[in-house]
Image: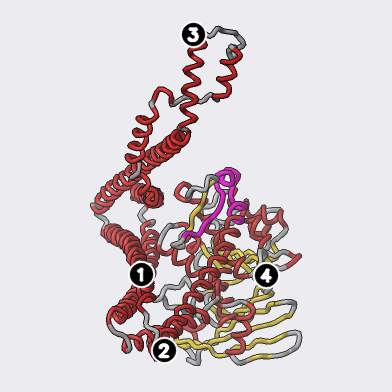
Amino acid sequence: MILKSLTLQHFRQFYGTQKLTFGANEDGAVTVILGENGRGKTGIYRAIIFGLYGEQRLEQDSNDANVTLANTKALQADFEGVKKGVEAKVMIEFQHTGVNYVIERSLLSIMDESGNPVERVQKVTLTNLDSKEVYEDEMIVNDWMDNILDRRVKGYFFFDGERIERLTRASVEQRSEISSGIKNLLKIDHLVKARQVLVHLQKQTIKQLEKHSTGDYKKCLQEKVEIEDKLDAFARKKEDLLSYGSQQDHQLAKIEKDLTRYEGKMSEFDKRAEIEAQLEKEEQEAEYAFRRLQEFNSKLPYMLAKNTLYAVKSQIDAYLGAEIEDVSISIDLVENLLNDLTCICGDTFKKDSSQYQALQSLKKAAGYKLEKAEYFDLKANVMKLIGFLEDKENQLQHLLEQLEREQQEVEDLKVKLDSLNRKLKETKIDDLYRLNKEREEVYENRIKVKYQLQELEEQMHELHSAKEQNELALASLKVKSGVHKQLVEKQEELEKAIVAMDKLLQEFEKDVISELESLSTQNFKYLLDENGQRNIKSVQVEDDYSLEVLNVYNHPFLANISQGQRQVLSLSFITALAQVAGGNDTLEMPLFMDTPFGRLSDKHQNNLLDFIPNVCSQWVLLVTDREFSLTEQEQFINSGQVGKFYKLISEEASTTKIQEQTLEMVGGIV
C-alpha cells in the first residue's frame, strides 16, 4: 500500500477541510510532520486508522479515555446553534498492487443535553478509481482492507516514543507486548478456536468415560479432569496477572511523568531512578546466576561418586604398588638396550655395572605394567573422572559464590532504595508526597506481580509433570471392551489431535520467533555504533517473551547496555515486527513513527535516519522541534529522501492548521 493523500473534515484538531499529500517513490518516500505535543500529530495517524478500518480508538488509548473524533470547535458551534450534529470525515487516496483506490468514512457527532459528544459511524465508501467500482457495504469494505493489511498487525506500522520506552524495560508489559505481537503475527485465530473445540469434546468424552469406569481407572480420569481444570484456571490467572502488571507499568509511567514537575527534588528522583535501574540490572544478573545453578543440577548426582572413585583409586594403588606406577617406557626398548649394552645416550656399559642393574629394574617394572595394563588403564580413567568432578566442584563453588554476591548486591540496593524512599516521604509538599506514595505502591505491586508469575509458572510446571504421570497411569489401566473401548479410542484420538495441533502451533511460533530474532539482530547491528557492534552478537526472544541481547561469547548482555542502546533495541524489534507482518524485509506499507528519537545518541539517530528509508516504501515521521533539530534537517536535505514536509500550527484552542513547508524554510537553511 502506498498512501497518496489524506483529506480531513472537522476531524480532531483539524477544523474545516484540510488535506495533505504523502511523499512516495522517486520524489522522496519520507513525509515529515512537525508539531508540538497536542497539535495533532497522533490525530493524523488516528485519521488513517479510522479511515482504513473504522476504528475510533487506538491501542495506546486507556480504557477510561473519552475519545471524540469530531472537532471540538465545530461541535460547540453546532451545540450553540442548529444542533443538527457535525459530520467528521476522513478520505484516504492510496495505491495497492498498482491499483488506485479512495476510501471515505464519516461519522455524525452531536452533543447531548449535558454537553457530552455522542458519535456513530455514518457512511463508508471504497472506490476503485481505475475500474470505477464502488463498494458501500461496511462488511465488504472491511474485508477488502483486511486483505490489504490485516487489522491485527496494523499496529506494527505505527509506534510512538511511549511504546519504544515500554520495550526498553524488562517488565510484565514488555513480555505482554512481545507475546501479543508474536501471536498476532501468527494469524491463527481459527486454529486456536478449533483447538478449543477439541478440548471441549475431550472433556465431554472423559466425563462419559467416568460413567462407564470403576476403580483406579475412574480415579485417574477424575484426576485428569482436575489437572486440566487447574491448568485452565492457572492460564486465566496468568492472563489476569499480565494484564494487571501492564496496568501497573502504565500507571508508573504516568506518575513518573507527573513527578517531573518537581525540579527542585529531581536530584533525589534521579538518584532513585539510578538505583532502581541498577537494582533491575542486579536482579537480572542474580536471575542469570540462579539459572546457571539450576542447569548444574543435572551434574550433581555424578559428584556423589567422588568418594567412591577415591576409594577405588586407593585399592588400585594398593594392588599395583605406587613405586612403579609412573613407568611409561616400552619393555622392547629396554630389552634392546640390555642386549646391546648401550645406553639411550649412546654410552656403553658392562653387565655388572649400575646402569645395567637400573635397566634390569626398569625392565621388571615395565613388564609388570604390561602384565597389569588393564588395572593401569582403569586407574587412568578413574583419575580422569576424579579430575572432572573436582573441576565441577570448583565450578559449583564459583556459581554459589557468584549467586551469593549478586543476591547480596540486590539486598544492599533494596536497603538503599528503602532509605531514599523514606527520605522522599518526609517532604512537606503534599502533592509530591502523594505521588511518591502512589509510586511506591505501584512499584511494590509490579514486584509482587513478577513473583506471583514466577510462582504460577512453577505450579503450572508441576501440573504438567503430574499430567504426564497421569497419562502414563491411564495408558496402563485402560479397558478395551464394549462402549468403553469406543470411548477410550475416541478420547485417545482427540488427545492425539490436540497434541498434534499444539505441536503445529509451537513450531509455527518458533519459526516466527526465529525470523523476528534474525531481523531484530540485523536491524540492531545496523543501528548500533561501532563499539556496540563489536560487543553484541544477537537479539533473542526468551521463553517468557522477554527480550535478551547476547554478547560475542553468547552470554546474556542486556543488563550491561545503555539506555540509548535499549531504545535502539526496541526500535529494531518493532521494525522487525513490521517487516514480518509485511512479509518482506522491505515493507510495502507506510511506516509511522511518533517522536521516535528519545534518548538516542547522535550516532544512533543518524543510523536510524539512514536505515528506515531503506526498509520501507514510505516513512511518515511525526516529530517535535526538540527532536528535529538543524542536524536532522540537514541530513534529510542531503539525503534527498524527503518528499513532503508539513508543520502543524495552532491557531486557537482545538484548531490546528496543516501548513506545507520546506525544510529550508523551517531551519533557515539555504
Q: Amino acid at mark 4?
A: Glu
| Residue 386 screen position, x and y as percent | 40, 38
Which residue shows up at 58% across the image and 90% down it?
A: 138
Q: Earlier in the sequence, mark 3 or mark 4?
A: 3
**Residue position for label 2:** 112
- Tell me which corner region of the image, top left, top right, bottom left or bottom right, holds residue 617: bottom right
Among numbered discs 3 and 1, the one appearing first in the sequence: 3
Q: CA distance from mark 3 to mark 2?
A: 121 Å
- What amino acid is at disc 3? Ser
Residue 120 visible? The answer is yes
Query: What element does badge 3 sit on?
Result: helix
Give the spatial CA distance, label 3 vs label 4.
92 Å
Q: Which mark is residue 469?
A: 1
Instruction: Name the amino acid type tagged 2.
Output: Asp
State yes or no: discs 3 and 1 in contact (Cβ < 8 Å).
no
- Magenta stretch holds residue 668: no
How packed mark 1 is, by other alpha carbons closer than 10 Å (few <14, some 14-19, many 20 or more), is few
Amino acid at dot 1? Gln
The circle on residue 489 is none
Q: Nearer the viewer, residue 658 or 328?
A: 328
Image vertical order of residue 436 relative to residue 205, above or below = above
Q: Which residues are magenta?
A: 522-542
Q: Which residue is mark 4?
A: 588
Based on the picture, tell me whether residue 525 belongs to the magenta stretch: yes
Q: Quadrant of the N terminus?
A: bottom right
